[in-house]
Amino acid sequence: MSPKCLSRKIYLIPIIILAVTLVGCSGADFGETDFNSWSNRLLSWDEKSDKYYSGNLKPGTYPVDLLFSDFYLAMGGETTLGPAISPVSTSEGQTKQFIEAGLMIFDPSAAKSSRFSLAPLGLELGVGEGELLGKAYRTGRIINGYLVIVDFLEEYERLGGARFVGKPISEAYNNPEKGRVEQYFENLGFYRLDGETKIRLMPYGAYACDRNCRTQEPSAGIPIRQPILPDSFLKKTFELGLPFVGKPLTGLHFSPDGKQEVIFENLVLVADNQAPSEVYVRPIAESIGTHAQNLTYPQDSSLSIFYEIEGGMGYNIPIYFIEYLDLYGGMQVAGEPISEVFSPEAGVYWQCFTNLCLQFNLNVEGDQRLRPVPLGKEYKAVDYESARNYEASQGLDNLDLKVWEKDTFVSSNGFQEIHVALFEDGKPLVNFEPVLIVTMPDGSQRKAYFQPSDENGRTSIKLSPIEAPSGTLIAYKICLLGMDEEPRCVGDNYLIWNSE
């Protein structure tokens, strides 16, 4: 992280004129060559011609909000789900963000391990039937009354099964018009192009978000999406210049104080809900531990300007910092100074303002010598309320897994039925697929999947008859995997009893 403004002392380095002039100490002057080159770099419009952003941001995509970042990566990131195509939004207590393949949801009222999910966009989009596949394809696993063909089954399980993909809502069909095999699920859609083995996801999110995520009609069936930021934030970003604000670290979101906020590498832009078109820079320097220094007196120097705060006291600002800030909106953007120039490390000199800090670094060359300190990264880590540990939220430590059999004993010709109820903190877990592992009389094991749990957290499975003499105990266990891949299992048994 960025070093903190901890020092209240201006270091006396002979080669830096700032320290010499601001504290009024004797010492060698800043070299005339260095003085001129620094001044020229600051004032050269040629080197500042990239102040206004001209295409470095990928149009139509957003940073994945920090709240969803770990979930997004756990699901395969952009390679699997495509880019984010909207900022986050909140409604009915849920936080949402569209990605190309779907809609991510965070619901703080849900059971801990179910707070992150994908919306059932497939149910909203509707499913058209195509040409049923031939018998050669009719292998896989029956879920919700539909066969998930073996081509899609591995990807379905890799992405979390019904828990995140949702239950299938169609058979697998051949789509000759698009040259692919496709199958629709509640939350995602799968397809495989003819002649390929790679499984791809349909753009559920792009089509569901529709014109809210487009600026013009889709080309070749791929929606063209809107700019990375809302117009008011984009305008302010252009005004300040992307090199000055730094790359965006989040999309638009609501901050803890209820304001609309976007965190950039070097600073944070906000807007009040009552005036969303008026975007300004948030004061973050003190909130992340960059503490203000004591006020001081003006120094008699032609190379600095005194900024009075109170009672004839304030801070001395190098003219070169002022001229640099004037290129990007001046003190109105930076805010009042909260420190003198100080050195957090050899050859590096900082001065902090309420909204940002500037650094002059003798250890680098070119226009990187004078630039804002990347405080946005630290603000995001420290003060961004939506920051959460995804895997921790997906733990099953408080899992209540109840198991029972329909019958205490069955004959060797009878069917047994195993029931499961899944709860976490008293809340039912929906769309979880427990695994049943049965130990057979010969010691071998057989594995089967339960159907996804319903809205009450319940599911069941029927076992085929097991040939065994009376008095044989059939041991089984039922396991559930969390995102941490640690199995939570409950074991039990039932009795084979053949009545004469």
Image (tube, helix red, strand yellow):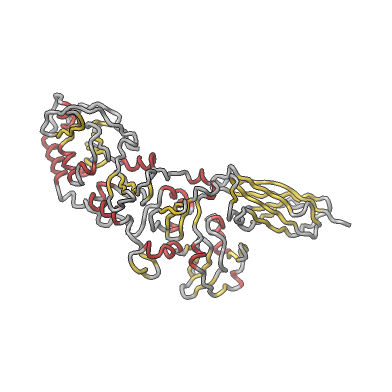
286 vs 52: above or below? above
Depth check: 13 or 452 in front? 452
In the image: residue 401, left or right of residue 372? right
Instruction: Give me the residue at 39% from left, 43% from top.
Output: 256
Instruction: Give me the residue at 21% from left, 44% from top.
Output: 367
Instruction: Measuring from the top left, give residue 455's x and y in whole percent.
Output: 60, 56
Depth check: 4 or 384 in front? 384
323 vs 344: above or below? below
Instruction: Measuring from the top left, give residue 384's x and y in whole percent.
Output: 39, 43
Instruction: Give me the residue at 38% from left, 48% from top.
Output: 254
In the image: residue 99, left or right of residue 171? left
- Residue 196 visible in the picture: no
Image mark count: 0
Q: Which image quarter holds the N terminus? A: top left
In the image: residue 338, left or right of residue 189? left
Depth check: 235 or 164 in front? 235
Residue that sits furthest to the top in the current view: 26
Q: Quadrant of residue 362?
A: top left
Instruction: Give me the residue at 54% from left, 48% from top.
Output: 113
Instruction: Measuring from the top left, give residue 457's x and y in whole percent.
Output: 62, 53
- Residue 68 visible in the picture: yes
Instruction: Measuring from the top left, give residue 404's x and y in whole percent.
Output: 71, 50
